[in-house]
Image (cartoon, rainbow, N blue to C red):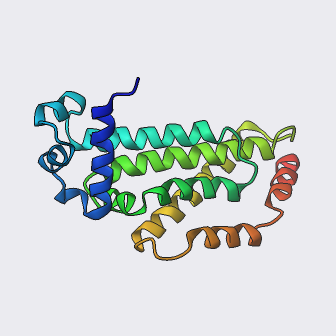
Amino acid sequence: MPNFTRKAIKETFLRQLGERPLGQITVKDIVEECGINRNSFYYHFEDLPALVEEILRERVDSLIQNHPTISSIEQGFDVVVEMLMQNKRAIYHIYNSLSRDVFERYLMEICLYTVTAYVDAALAGQPVAETDRAVIIRYHKCVCFGSVIDWLSGGMKEDITAFFHRVCQLKKGWQEDIVRRCQEN
């Protein structure tokens, strides 16, 4: 049975984070809205950064569980953006806070997962050396991560999905070229 107090704390925090920056939210704000005392908060979480960390961890784990396979690089990117858009303002406030490093670590994990799942499916049965596979994954992970960070830095104003889909259209055929080059070397 889920812990309702823990769940209420997370939901309240996310609601408040959708309204104002992380630096303006206190434990007092959360416990007052939840109707619990400070000790109850600290029973469940060490501090606000621990709360942020747990929420991000749960989101990443859920994303991985709900997307066991990725059939295209576009789908992989869409999965990352979908997670970010579920709580757009909250994510933006975490990104622009002292917890940015935690956010970036989890974003990198999501990018790595989606790219690896896609590359493994796309290159299945192809004669690609493990070192080349690792290079391909690293490159695409960094493109995904960098694109999202650039979008966040710009205030999340543009349609990042349309941008990334266009990049993929322009790069059509890269898989075949990579496999060919891997075989040549």
Q: Position of residue 123 (x, y in %)?
A: 81, 44
Left or right of 48, for residue 119? right
Whether residue 8 is visible, yes or no, is: yes
Q: Count the labels in the image.
A: 0
Residue sticking out furthest to the front? 35
Residue furthest out toward the bottom: 158
The residue shown at (24%, 30%) is 44
Residue 70 coordinates in the image, percent (x, y): 71, 46
Quarter-of-image position of residue 120: top right
At which x and y percent is residue 185? Answer: 83, 48
Left or right, residue 91 beside residue 127? left
Specify whether 27 is left or right of 173: left
Tell me if I can see residue 132 in this picture: no
- Residue 153: % across, % down: 40, 69
Residue plotted at (35% across, 46% down): 102
- Compared to 93, does 132 lie above or below? above
Residue sitting at x 56%, y 43%? 63
Write the residue at 64% across / 42% down. Answer: 67
Could you say which is closer to the camera, residue 82 or residue 32? 32
Say if 143 sits above or below 118 in the image: below
**Residue in the foreground of this view, choosing between 41 and 48:** 41
Where, quadrant-wise, is the N terminus in this rendering? top left
Q: Nearer the viewer, residue 60 or 131?
A: 60
